[in-house]
Amino acid sequence: MKKYIKKNIQKIKKKKILIVTACDISNGGVSVFLYNMLSHIKYYELCIHLYFPGEIISQPMADKLLELGIVIYIGGCSSGDTVREIAYKDLECLVCSNNYDVIHSNSGKVWINYYSCYFGVKNNIPVRIVHSHSAMLPRKKAEVQKQDDIYRRFILEHATDFLACSAKAAQWLFGEKFQNYNIFKNGIDLEKYKFDTNIRKEYRKELNLGNKFVIGHVGRFVKAKNHEFILKIFKEIMGRSNNCILLMAGDGELLESIKEKSISMGIDHNCIFLGGRMDIPGLLNAMDIFVFPSLFEGFPISLLEAQANGLPCVMSEEITQEVCLLEDTKMISLENSEEYWAEQILKYKMVHKKRKIYSEKLREAGYSIQDSANCLWKLYIR
């Protein structure tokens, strides 16, 4: 386990928080959620340790977290076969070596939440928060499911706080009968995502988009995001209108294979793969529609960001209904064909209207970053 810390941090006695994840440091998902929250609380009044069992996929994101004075521990595990063993040993070492006041586990994976809760109880950590960020993670083996059921019972008995980004995410981790949880809204910096005509012009010029109809997607290249289906939809769109561009931002293990797939499908000349980016607000301004046909999700922050930018969004019905906050969102079943998806997306090409400023609507719905950060702060300092 490697430790990353910004130099010249003052060592002052503060409340100690251990935040646990089950992933890499990346430009999406839990990494973005944690940065959004921690950058808007009084982080300088806390001693925060972050644990990632994976690797640093995005050095810029790691640098941003370090700038907050947060100590980062990386397990360095890139193999799914050993990640549980490494995380168990790392957490045992961390919790036994530090007198934490709070342990906050952030994942839809039952095992990492169990480890956090187990070591929290064993070491008398008074506040043990379990936080679900995913609505469904596929099971590979029956024995894994059986083990997770045992872990889940321990979590329900020993955690002090139960959080979830949506009702679906809560049901997935805590069970359908459990109701003693709170919805924690994944707030964003609404001002940062406001639509701006000048920024749109700059980005469209930089990306050489011209007057193309730009279909956008932001997300890690992993199975859950369903990128291969996005390519199939786009091929159907290309068959109906060649004045279109598919613009995708994100990194991940499937990025290269999806690029190769676009070449074999003969659509690569109209596909732009940007890789991991830190300038998502600017990229959203350049898009005309946002497409998100995920296989499963908890509450995707990228959809919230797109709506704050005034983008019409077309998403799968597998995503929680709670993310549909504005009238320009449409949910489609994944049982529908790529032809049907293409038809629905192209309907927006005919609509010429100004992008609305939706910040106030999202603020009223409780998705301001400051409101969410304040909720987290109260959990930490009580």
Image (cartoon, helix red, strand yellow):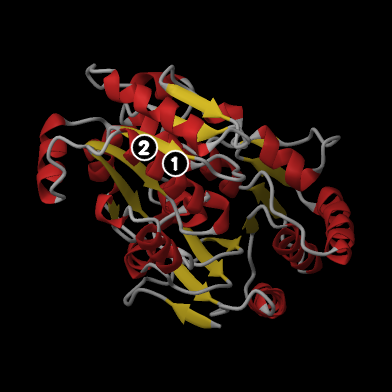
Location of residue 299 with respect to 24 vertically, above or below: above
Q: Secondary structure at mark 2?
A: helix
Q: Secondary structure at mark 1?
A: helix
**Which amino acid is tagged 1?**
Ile
Location of residue 211 with respect to 359 vertically, above or below: below
Q: Which mark is residue 280?
A: none
Q: Which residue is mark 1?
A: 233
Q: Position of residue 314 (x, y in %)?
A: 45, 31
Label 2: few (<14), some or many (≥20) within 10 Å? many
Q: Position of residue 103 (x, y in %)?
A: 65, 59
Q: Nearer the viewer, residue 338 or 154?
A: 338
Q: Position of residue 100 (x, y in %)?
A: 63, 65
Q: Is residue 356 visible?
A: no
Q: Nearer the viewer, residue 118 or 46?
A: 118
Among the 4 quarters of the image, the one containing residue 322: top right
**Which amino acid is tagged 2?**
Ile
Left or right: where 94 falls relative to 40: right
Q: How many numbered circles are shown?
A: 2
- Give the distance between the C-alpha atoms of the residues marked 2 and 1, in whole angstroms: 6 Å
Residue at point 37%, 71% (across, down) = 10
Q: Position of residue 47 (x, y in %)?
A: 49, 63
Location of residue 77 with respect to 222 vertically, above or below: below
Which quadrant does the C terminus fall into? top right
Q: Which mark is residue 237?
A: 2
Q: Nearer the viewer, residue 278 or 228?
A: 228
Left or right: where 188 falls relative to 243: right
Residue at point 83%, 59% (across, down) = 148
Which quadrant does the N terminus fall into? bottom right
